[in-house]
Amino acid sequence: MTVRTTMAAVTATALSLALAAPAVASADGGGDGHEATRRAMEAAVADGVPGVTATVRDGRRGWSATAGVGDLETGKPRSPHDRYRVASITKTFVATVLLQLEAEGKLSLDDTVEEWLPGLVRGNGHDGSRITLRRLLNHTSGIYDYLADPVFQQTYMAAEGFLQHRYDRKEPEYFIAIAMTHEPYFAPGTSWHYSNTNYALAGRVIEKATGRAYGDAIRERIIKPLHLTATSVPGTRVTVPRPSSRAYSKLARTATGPTYDVTELNPRLAYGSGEMISSSADLNRFYTALLRGRLLPPEQLEEMKTTVRSRGTNGYGLGLVDRTLSCGVHVWGHDGGIHGSNTDAVTTADGRHALAFNFNGDWSGDADGVVEAEFCGR
């Protein structure tokens, strides 16, 4: 539901003997220019990730590979065509729709949250009349992140709570209300702090502006025009469409202890902050189209790419992250972590070189290492 927010992101030992010798399958043979990426995927599996699936588009050339397994019980390998939960990558889709609505004159990013969602952002210092839609999208609102609430974490992220509540049905207002029981991180516009509450609110704004579910807007405006056949906004559907792998978690802040199959859950709990499902090929197509101006007019794309300093050398735009790699290459995209699924999707500014990949375990593996390997060759 957040940028790499899971119950743990620490070094892990191998899950089982089945993972001791990770197998890699590639659409191309060896010596294809992606050897470093292949090694980084193998390293993630050796570090404890059950399996990895990745797809690259570089100009007119495509490359796909898998490592490890998609099912710990059967040993079935992952597929290059796997569907998986993309978590916070949903935020780029939500931001794109809001920017489209701005381009159509249906709203302004300088509108306040109070104008669109009266009374929803109030309490303990929160004031929706001081928070613009732009500040939701670039995380400068200061609104508390409901995922950080201790009761939420015990209920939906720790093992006992998750296993009891994984199929709960709650509307976004329930989680927004949790955020309002805490003080904001800072006054609106004075700093940056990642908050999933921002995109719960953004999803509701889309619904107010369009008169339909935010997922319907994403389907009509992005999924259908780009023919993203593996991409969906699943609502309360608890399963992942096939082909897909199982998803695994420790459901604890540790790399040891039991491993749980967390494939099934109600993704509606993540809503606009992280509900969606996709595949590596679809994510590459989406980000390539976005950065090449197929989804937004130049003015709105420029707004989306106007960043504020977030973490390290990264800049956060409007649902879009600018990452500077060790070799000086800039890539744009987003990552996302939800129970049993960690995903990264990054693309160069010209849309020529794109990478998307997924780990089907959430407690180990160096995702940054895979990105560095593909774009910097190390």
Image (cartoon, rainbow, N blue to C red):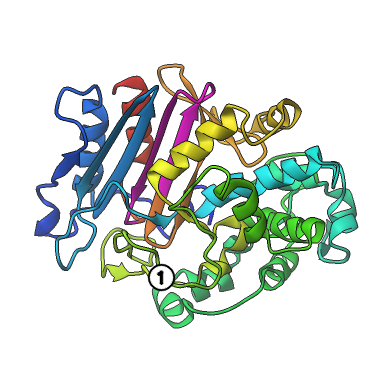
- The residue that appears at 75% across and 27% down in the rendered structure is 299
In this view of the protein, which residue sits in the foreground, 54 or 36?
Answer: 54
Name the residue rendered at 26%, 70% in the picture.
258
Between residues 68 and 217, which one lies in front from this camera angle? 217
**Other-residue count near label 1 (Cα within 10 Å), few / some / many at <14 / 14–19 / ≥20:** few
On the image, the x and y values in percent for residue 61 come to 33, 25
Majority secondary structure of the magenta segment? strand
The residue that mark 1 highlights is: 239
Above-or-below relation of 173 to 114? below
- Residue furthest to the top in view is 328
Q: Is residue 2 left or right of residue 319?
A: left
Can you tell which quarter of the image residue 361 is in?
A: bottom left
Q: Position of residue 317 (x, y in %)?
A: 65, 35
Judge whether 151 appears above or below 222 on screen. Answer: below
Helix or strand or loop: what does disc 1 sit on? loop
**In this rendering, position of residue 109 left or right of residue 355:** right
Q: Position of residue 378 (x, y in %)?
A: 29, 23
Task: Verify whether residue 372 appears in magenta.
Answer: no
Magenta range is 343-361
Q: Is 287 drawn above or below residue 242 in the view shown? A: above
Total number of numbered discs in the rendering: 1
Q: Nearer the viewer, residue 229 or 90?
A: 229
Tell me if residue 214 can be seen: yes
Which amino acid type corresponds to the residue marked 1 in the rendered image?
Thr
Q: Give the residue at x 36% y 69%.
A: 262
Instruction: Please tell me in which quadrant of the rendered image residue 377 appears.
Output: top left
In magenta stretch: residue 358: yes
Q: Is residue 187 visible?
A: no
Q: Position of residue 172 (x, y in %)?
A: 67, 68
- Furthest residue toward bottom: 164
